[in-house]
Image (spheres, grey):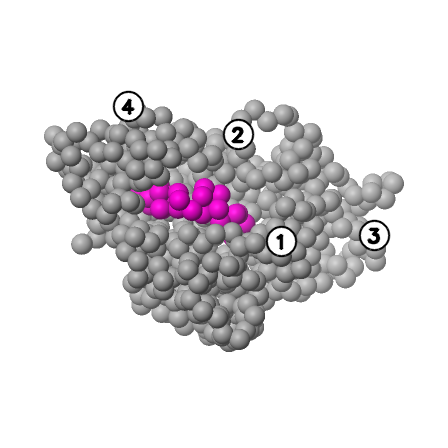
Amino acid sequence: MTSARSHTEWWKSAVIYHVYPRSFQDTTGSGVGDLNGITRRLEYLSKTLGIDAVWISPFYPSPMADFGYDVADYTDVDPLFGTLEDFDRLLDEAHRLGLKVIVDWVPNHSSDQHPWFLESRASRTNTRRDWYMWADPKPDGSPPNNWLSPFGGPAWEFDEPTGQYYLHSFLREQPDLNWRNPEVEAAMFDTLRFWLDRGVDGFRIDVAHYIMKDPNLTDILPAPPPTHEADFKPLGGYDAWEHVNDKGHPDVHAVFRRLRHVLDEYDGDRFAVGEIHIFDWHEWATYYGNGDELHMPFNFSLVWAEWNATAIRRRIEALEAVIPEDGWPNYVLGNHDEQRLATRYGPQNAPAAAVLLLTLRGQPTIYYGDEIARRETPVPPELQIDPWGLRVPGMGRDGCRTPMPWTPGPGHGFTLPDVEPWLPFGGDADERNVETQLTDTASVVNTYRRLLHIRRGRRSLLSGSIQFIDDLPADVLGFVRADGQERTVVFINFADETRPVRALPGSAMLLSTENGRGHVGTNGLVLSPHEAVVIDAGPVQ
């Protein structure tokens, strides 16, 4: 099948695959994945699956208080993962295979072991003191304001030698950089240029909207009672407050416009997507700017949507209503912070979730292991290591970060047979692994492969419009993707029972998660429980 790609910007039609490097492939026998392991598996991503781009979570030097999201050097590779030369080989091999490479960039905070912070902390008169957010105590010695960390407790840490508090929106080992200092902005933009000069194709920006806070450090206020279904997992006491002063200050948009200029200095449509948890759709959409800020803010709305046709459609329509004319949507169903989708939605719905993700209008991102319906791994208390979970019971992310099982048997192709991995595989890795699933034509991984092949060859799925179908059973979602004369129809049955749907005579079924390929009857078709189908509806009559 020939490619139907027609966009100048590669990222609009790309399918991105999210790699958590600690858990993808170990080549050293350490029990921890590494950059050479990612390089080893690039052909799987490119040729076996048909992925277009790979996003790699942080691999920078780090004390690993938050497993790499506490960066001690923005322009190097932690020895745990390899070397800069290993990264360059990864990048060269990815480009040889036609894959784009996106790296994680963590601008809100560094590690407390970063040389910048060590200098900043040395004294109040140090030239880098103002590179981080320091403030005097209140007269009673308490923190400067009531800001909180979602990781538990106040977002301030007292530094006794200098008599001030520093801000840490997350762990105390992650002090917040002061983006109101032009020297900080210049230094951080230079770290972008370091990786752009090496040839990376884009950046995923960690907690992007946090970098600008209220300059007056105004207290946050109690949150009003919720009036709608949850947009994010519950965060306990953190949810009791309205977080309008401790992140997302309007000044952030000017920073992103300047960041966009940095990206535009380079050819090849260098790309930036921001992790932005904002649940007012209109405010969320402002991060597109006028096509001059982020290429897109990440859209997490489906991650915590109820798995039913009404809730899913409502969130898609809400997104579509605010996307600017020159903007492009995106969707994600899982990542390194969220419970595995096969556990959230149930393993019986994993194939339908793949259809949803890969046929909606917009850029999809697949989390490693979701293509084999990897489930949340139960991690015994004595093996749990995620700092969030250790500080706030129930918030642990270890279960969604466990190693990728490539094969049956000891080590599961991730590490040596006699090596203990950094997190356990779980009890189903002998049955639920890449090698075993690839031999089963009805497996989830082969559903992903067929979907990716279909998507690549259909303009309507890459760039087409979306229109929902109304005259359907309440628990069936249906929509039409159209580009010119080409139309693709998608039906997803969320019910535990069969459901009839109408289809145009002469339509051809491209994929069914239950029945393979076939023709749609003149009276339509009957969807099996949890079945999703992709149909070539033929040209517009």
Circles 3 and 4, Cβ within 8 Å, touching? The answer is no
**Three-letter code for the amino acid on which mark 1 is drawn:** His
Q: Look at 38% across and 40% down and name the residue there.
A: 329
- The residue beneath circle 4 is 471
Labels 2 and 4: the sequence-earlier one: 2
Q: Are marks 2 and 3 in contact (CB under 8 Å)?
A: no
**Which residue was labeled with disc 1?**
109
Residue of label 2: 229
Tell me how far mark 3 sits from mark 4, CA to CA.
66 Å
Q: CA distance from mark 2 to mark 3?
A: 43 Å
**Mark 2–mark 4 distance (CA, rounded to whole Å):** 25 Å
Which residue occupies 28% across, 56% down? 441
Query: Quick one: label 1, few (<14), some, or many (20+) residues within 10 Å?
Result: many
Q: Secondary structure at mark 2?
A: loop
Task: Report the mark closest to the observer, 3 or 4.
Answer: 4
| Residue 284 to residue 94: above or below | above
In terms of sequence position, does the residue under pointer 3 or pointer 1 come before the other? 1
- Please tell me which of labels 3 and 4 falls first in the chain: 3
Foreground of the two, 225 or 532: 532
Give the image location of residue 21, x and y in percent.
49, 63
Kind of residue indicated by mark 2 = Glu
- Was residue 123 drawn as part of the magenta stretch in this picture? no
Q: Is residue 29 left or right of residue 385?
A: left
Instruction: Return the residue at label 3.
Output: 163
- Magenta residues (range): 335-362
